[in-house]
């Protein structure tokens, strides 16, 4: 079995890439396969050593990519998570010399593909795809956007969905009132304010719904703005008269606790402002758990929910958001039908199946190396 070197932010850092990388690494090495994580950190990260981390690349270390590449080259294949803001340099450009220094096959996982990138962002991503052995997008939308908007070779791009934990068998917290749920790191753009306005429009229901907003404020938001966004939500809830119905859980839930929370929800609400988001781990987790979803029309939601296990509504439209939630709560059979549409998808979305696809891809890239070397020498 191949060994895997992973490059990413990683727990105890709390962000989507860290969570994704931790889960992927755990499942690819669950059978005892050798693996090691090169953890990317900045000055605000928790610097405590973490299990599985074999090297730390600090953003404060000049040319830290050299040592990181050396460590990754000690494995059979390098799996690299990419976001523009994770690596040092303008738009994270220091990942590019690292890729060029690798002597082992590399799989770069693109968490963001911008529809309107800056010239620098476009050039950088094109060079990353050119240098990587293979690039993974997590949705067809992201792949199409990459192939249409960027000059990249199509044969280098493959789609593997974002993985999800298996929460289907998790016990659910018992609730006596309809329960709406949003979770994940908070910050401007999360759209919670639209959910609060929607909740105010649902106060005629009997019993009235409750709404849980679970998650800490994003560390980078804390650095720049403190808790201004969360405080604004509390004020808005009071002004709307729904503060009593909203439970803000300012903690980072472990998987068992999160599983119970998801299973207790009647509707997962994703009111994001973004029109760019081509990958949402929260969306995948909700869908895989079989809970109906109401989401704004960000690209991943449009791709996964249209005709599927949820309802898509316009951005920044609390009336449409409330109408969709109301339908799921009171329209006979709708919640059951929406949940039923995920069953054919769920097995392919869970982490064991997703990790197996990465394993198959890695084995194919490793197997191709001698052929490539032979062809080059000929």
Image: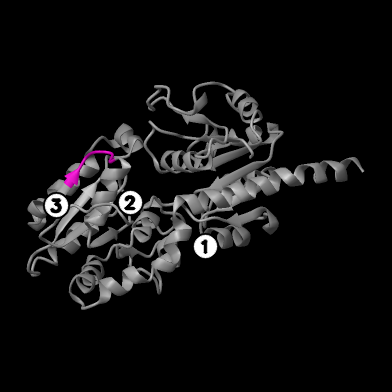
Q: Magenta span has 249?
A: yes
Tell whether 123 sits left or right of 41.
right
Question: Which of these two is toward me, 280 or 52?
Answer: 52
| Vertical relation: 241 (above or below) 218 | below
Badge 2 marks a residue whose secondary structure is loop
Q: CA distance from mark 1 to mark 2?
A: 21 Å
Residue lying furthest right in this view?
378
Q: Tell me, for residue 141, which label it has, or none.
A: 1
Badge 3 marks a residue whose secondary structure is strand
- Mark yes or no: residue 56 visible: no
For mark 2, does the 10 Å Cα neighbourhood hold few (<14), some (14 to 19), or many (20 or more) residues? few
**Quarter where residue 187 is shown:** top left
Residue 165 location, x and y as percent? Answer: 39, 50
Q: Which residues are magenta?
A: 248-253
Question: Which of these two is toward me, 142 or 94?
Answer: 142
Q: Residue at x 49, y 22 (%)?
A: 60
Q: Tell me, for residue 189, which label it has, or none.
A: 2
In this view, the mark in front (3 or 2): 3
Q: Which residue is mark 3?
A: 246
Q: Magenta span has 300?
A: no
- Mark yes or no: residue 214 visible: yes
Residue 211 location, x and y as percent? Answer: 17, 55
Q: Which circle's residue, 3 or 2, is located before the other in the chain? A: 2
Q: Kindly report the secondary structure that dominates the magenta region of the rendered protein.
A: loop
Q: Tell me, for residue 103, which label it has, or none.
A: none
Tell whether 67 sits left or right of 277.
right
Q: Residue at x 55, y 50 (%)?
A: 356
Residue 269 location, x and y as percent? Answer: 27, 59
């Amino acid at each position: 079995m191949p060994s895997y070197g992973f490059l990413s932010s990683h727990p105890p850092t709390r962000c989507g890439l860290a969570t994704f990388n931790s889960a992927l690494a755990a499942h690819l090495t669950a059978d005892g396969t050798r693996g090691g994580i090169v953890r990317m950190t900045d000055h605000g990260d928790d610097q405590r050593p973490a299990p599985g981390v074999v090297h730390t690349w600090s953003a404060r270390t000049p040319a830290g990519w050299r040592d990181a590449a050396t460590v990754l080259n000690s494995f059979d294949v390098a799996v690299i998570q990419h976001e523009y803001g994770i690596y040092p340099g303008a738009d994270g450009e220091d990942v590019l010399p690292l890729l060029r220094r690798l002597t082992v096959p590399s799989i770069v996982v693109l968490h963001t593909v911008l529809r309107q990138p800056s010239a620098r962002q476009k050039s950088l991503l094109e060079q990353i795809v050119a240098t990587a052995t293979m690039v993974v997008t997590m949705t067809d939308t992201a792949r199409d956007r990459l192939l249409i908007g960027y000059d990249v070779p199509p044969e280098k791009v493959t789609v593997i969905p974002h993985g999800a934990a298996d929460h289907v068998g998790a016990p659910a917290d018992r609730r006596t009132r309809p329960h709406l749920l949003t979770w994940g790191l908070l910050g401007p753009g999360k759209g919670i304010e639209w959910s609060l306005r929607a909740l105010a429009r649902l106060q005629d229901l009997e019993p009235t719904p409750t709404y849980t907003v679970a998650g800490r404020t994003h560390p980078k938001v804390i650095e720049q703005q403190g808790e201004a966004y969360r405080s604004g939500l509390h004020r808005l809830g009071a002004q709307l008269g729904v503060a009593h119905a909203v439970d803000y859980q300012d903690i980072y839930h472990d998987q068992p606790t999160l599983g119970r929370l998801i299973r207790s929800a009647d509707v997962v609400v994703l009111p994001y402002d973004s029109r760019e988001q081509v990958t949402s781990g929260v969306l995948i987790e909700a869908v895989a758990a079989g809970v109906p979803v109401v989401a704004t029309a960000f690209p991943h939601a449009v791709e996964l929910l249209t005709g599927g296990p949820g309802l898509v509504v316009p951005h920044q439209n609390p009336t449409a958001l409330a109408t969709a939630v109301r339908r799921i709560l009171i329209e006979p059979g709708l919640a059951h039908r929406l949940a039923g549409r995920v069953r054919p998808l769920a097995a392919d979305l869970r982490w064991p199946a997703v990790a197996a696809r990465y394993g198959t891809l890695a084995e194919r890239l490793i197997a191709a190396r001698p052929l490539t070397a032979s062809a080059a020498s000929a």
